[in-house]
Amino acid sequence: MSGLLPRLRIASKHRRPDIQLIIGGLACITILILTIGKDFFAPGDPLSGDIMDRFKPMFEGKYVLGTDQLGRDLWTRVFAGLPWSLGIACVATLIAMTVGTSAGLIAAWKPGPVRTVINRMVDTIIAFPGLVIAICIIAAIGRGFWPLAITLGVLTWPFYARVVYAEALGLMERNYVLAAQLYGVPSRWILIRHVLPGLRPTLLVMLAFHFADMLIAESALSFLGLGAPLQAPTWGNMLAESRQYLFNAPWMMLVPAAAIVVVVVTLNLIGDGIAATTRSKARAVE
Amino acid sequence: MSEKLLSIDDVRVTFPHDKFEKFHAVNGVSLEVEPGETLGIVGESGSGKTMLALSMMGLVPRPGIVDGGNIHLLGQPIDRLSEKQLSTIRGRDVGMVFQDPMTGLNPVRKVGSLLIESIQRHRSRSRAEARDLALNTFIEVGIPSPEVRLDSYPHQLSGGLRQRVMIALALVNHPPLIIADEPTTALDATIQAQILELLKVKLSKSALILITHDLGVAAEICDRVAVMYHGKIMELGFMNDVLDNPAHPYTAGLLAAAPRFDWNRPDLEPIPGSPPEAGSIVPGCAFKPRCGFASPACEDAPNMKISSYRELACHHPLFEEFSDGY
């Protein structure tokens, strides 16, 4: 072994890890553990409660986070909302990223009518009020997990398409793309193996922020009654129910709102952390 | 169909200038390459050397087009093939060593994976077989500890090593023709000598087109040399012959401006003026404004005069054979 590789490994060990990334990562792992072990941490039934215990404030008796208007334990309900919210955000992000990245790459590779059609489509969807499209789609195919996830994905893929298109145009001007053509790599391979890896840092950062956006959008749509089935214990539904009792039982609003804020802040920390690390890595390479 | 390895006939590469005008980056170049020979193409920046090379691979960058002439590689008309057909030829029938090894390798890919990709593109090999082939090629081009280098990223390699990787990429599938575009420009003098040596030895089975602005580099390894100026070939002949007896005033000017150790001479004589800007249109002979022999006849562009061992485009050649009968 030559001396080069070990030295580089030491160098990367000395690079200071980003503090935001560490906090965000730890929080993210905690959230995942809580989601997976939700039956362990919150064993109760989120759909039934003791009507005699309605409107119990926080830290009263056995109710750590209080109860709602039907005496249901908010601790149990907020846990029950976790997989739903994270699941929808996850699926929606994946749909948007896959569709958007493919569309952006194709638009960058194929000038002419293909590029024009994709770019105009992107413009149209971004310019159109998202809520109206969401209402239309959900009115047509009904509420529930998949309709909501697909709707959010369809509404937001253009943002990926736009960013990927702009970045890919720049990457395709690089000499290594020309070099790959010189040794006979077909266009499809060049897009996937040479241009796509260069987009990785950008996509990772977008992914983190977009995931957070999707979480908020899901809660907002549920709040408006467009998302989850009405009885489902989701954060958006809990917020919607809390509206009537805002002044008498503010904890009903605070608990789901705090859950949303915690998850969103976590994701934003991760996004900022990745952005900062890739920036400093890029500096180190240059 | 030609029996030559590569034959180029009156090729023009054109770029649009504005709505009505266009200019020729390569303006009617003809040449042939025989199997196994080494041809140098020498010229200043902007003389169209690189565009000529890219046209041979069907890779003239947009908005440029090849709008005239024929390019045949192993009998295949390069200028009339689809992108798909071209991509099977590139790397298999013709390889190219790139000008700048610093930017020619994808920074997020291991260099070995690039080689394996090229091998699997052109030959049906399993990944393990392709890796063995890649390893052998690395050994062939003299990369130390090749097993480790296969899994290195470009930024972990020095400039000289990267250029060796580029050469490995060009010759991994043993194409009969390799085009090297300024392969040593970005390297320092010692590495330059090593890379030239490598090209000379390793490519003995393939034909090589060496594109350079450095006559010394061309003199080092080329059998024949073509001197380009403003998109045209000024003079083409056997290397030693051209060095000893330049027929074109421009070639003579280049030689007089080149430092030589074996030639005791007090001063270098620069060619007065500067070359026409790439894209400008010069009527008549493009070298006329800088030429000491220019006459009214030079208002007409000279045709290519061909003798048995030399091709020349000049109204005022420097020695007898070319000066009559025109």
Image: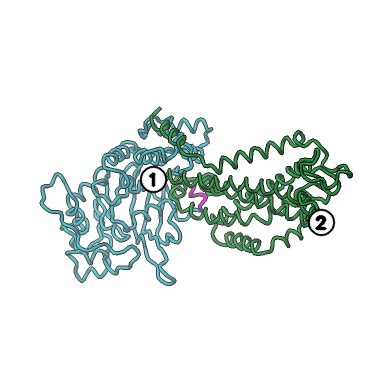
Of A50 and B45, which appears nearest the observer? Answer: A50
Q: Chain of mark 1?
A: B
Give above or below for B16 relative to A176.
Answer: below
User: Chain B, which colour?
Assistant: cyan
Residue located beneath label 1 in the image: B102
User: Left or right: B124 with respect to A66?
Assistant: left
Q: In the rendered image, is residue A207 in sight?
A: no
C-alpha gap between disc 2 and disc 1: 65 Å
Locate the C terminus of chain B by quadrant: bottom left
Q: Is residue B270 left or right of residue A77?
A: left
- Look at the image and say whether residue B116 sits in the magenta stretch: no
- Disc number at residue A43? none
* Residue A72, quarter of the rendered image: top right
Residue A244, which numbered label?
A: 2
Main secondary-structure element of the magenta-colored stretch: helix
Q: Amino acid at mark 1?
A: Met
Label 1 neighbour load within 10 Å: few <14, some 14-19, many 20+: many
Please determine if labels 2 and 1 lie on a single subunit: no
Mark yes or no: residue A269 visible: yes
How packed mark 2 is, by other alpha carbons closer than 10 Å (few <14, some 14-19, many 20 or more), is few
Residue at 62 percent across and 46 percent down: it is: A267
Percent position of residue A80, x then y: 77, 42
Q: Nearer the viewer, residue B207 or B151?
A: B151
Magenta segment range? B83-88
User: Is mark 2 in CB contact (under 8 Å) with mark 1?
Assistant: no
Residue at 58% x, 45% y is A270
Q: Nearer the viewer, residue B241 or A71?
A: A71
Q: Colour of chain A?
A: green
Q: x%, y% of residue A241?
A: 81, 53
Disc 1 secondary structure class: loop
